[in-house]
DNA sequence: AAAATAAATAGTAATAATTACTATTTATTT
DNA sequence: AAATAAATAGTAATTATTACTATTTATTTT
């Protein structure tokens, strides 16, 4: 993959925020560095950075967000402000631990386990 | 909420399949019963059925799927065929239990915990 | 049962997120 | 410095979803 200033700016933006930004947020921030950058360039590079395992895509409802924390982790999503907060779960009594450690009142735990179903064995 | 044949067909379709259908799938099936039904009607009724707690929306990546199983549960998502399989987790060693009970080889566990963050206390 | 009322519909247009296309620019190689 | 091919900007297309509006229909009132 050939170097490009645009891709570097995009990656830096994602690495320097904790907010798990959307493509649109990245686009508007990138424009302050490269005024002529186009939204298509943002999407194209997000895809390439994901292929390169430099970022990960997380779907929050129906909108894609991007995360440069490539260690396996999960998220706390606030119902009020929508923030996604990184966590590392490895505990059993999840709700209680989260209240203690993050002062976050759990109302719902949504979990998607992926893998290969029995049809493909 | 006033009765409508369209809404009844939509709800029946969701209740009689295990595939967690998308709005588009529901639309195409509903057309065989009500040829003039419109996609807007499908979306409007999906929203009403959700407000009425008759169905739940699950976001699978960036596309909404609808589920009439209103008991709290999670899903196994097959990487190969994309199927969503209902599960009730309450066990500790998740991966091993799932392999045993569903013959499903877990490769990833994605979890979103929602609630209220400390900014709102 | 007929008329009145308001909610629901079909059909179409609008919006938002994302992807595709293409002529031009630019990083890298020769 | 010239050649090459990957990346870009800008625009158009696509997909999922929502909004709008004149017409239809379920329900209520007479």
Image (cartoon, coloured by chain):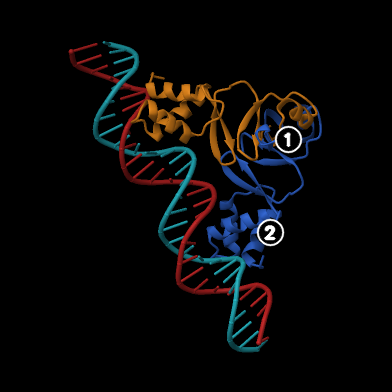
Chain colours: A orange, B blue, C cyan, D red
**Above/below status of B53 relative to A93:** below
Q: Where is residue A44 in the image (x, y as percent from the top left)?
A: 43, 31
- Answer with left or right where residue A45 lies relative to residue B89: left
Label 1 chain ID: A
Residue found at x 40% / y 35%: A39
Q: Position of residue B117 (x, y in %)?
A: 67, 34
Whether residue A107 appears in this view of the structure is yes
Q: Quadrant of the N terminus of chain A?
A: top left
**Above/below status of B66 relative to A111:** below
- Answer with left or right where residue B10 lies relative to residue B69: left
| Label at residue A57 | none
Mark 2 element type:
helix
Q: Position of residue B109 (x, y in %)?
A: 68, 30
**Above/below status of B26 relative to B118:** below
Q: Nearer the viewer, residue B65 or A10?
A: A10
Return the residue at label 2. Answer: B12
Label 2 chain ID: B
Location of residue A120 (image quadrant): top right
Q: In which quarter of the image is the C terminus of chain A?
A: top right
Q: Distance between the residues labelled 2 and 1?
A: 36 Å
Q: Nearer the viewer, residue A53 or A107?
A: A107
Residue found at x 77% / y 24%: A91
Q: How crowded is mark 2: few (under 14 residues within 10 Å), some or many (20 or more)?
A: few
Q: Nearer the viewer, residue A82 or A103?
A: A103
Whether residue B16 appears in this view of the structure is no
Return the residue at label 1. Answer: A105
- Answer with left or right where residue B29 lies relative to residue B93: left
Mark 1 element type:
strand
Between disc 2 and disc 1, the foreground one is 1
Q: Residues within 10 Å of mark 1 (few under 14, many from 20)?
A: many
């Amino acid at each position: 993959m050939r170097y490009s200033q645009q891709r570097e700016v995009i990656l830096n933006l994602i690495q320097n925020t904790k907010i798990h930004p959307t493509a649109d947020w990245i686009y508007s921030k990138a424009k302050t560095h490269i005024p002529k950058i186009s939204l298509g360039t943002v999407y194209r590079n997000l895809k390439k950075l994901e292929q390169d395992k430099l970022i990960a895509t997380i779907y929050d409802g129906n909108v894609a967000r991007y995360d440069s924390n490539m260690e396996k982790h999960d998220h706390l999503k606030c119902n009020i402000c929508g923030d996604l907060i990184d966590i590392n779960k490895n505990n059993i009594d999840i709700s209680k631990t989260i209240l203690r450690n993050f002062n976050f009142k759990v109302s719902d735990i949504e979990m998607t386990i992926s893998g290969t179903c029995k049809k493909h064995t």
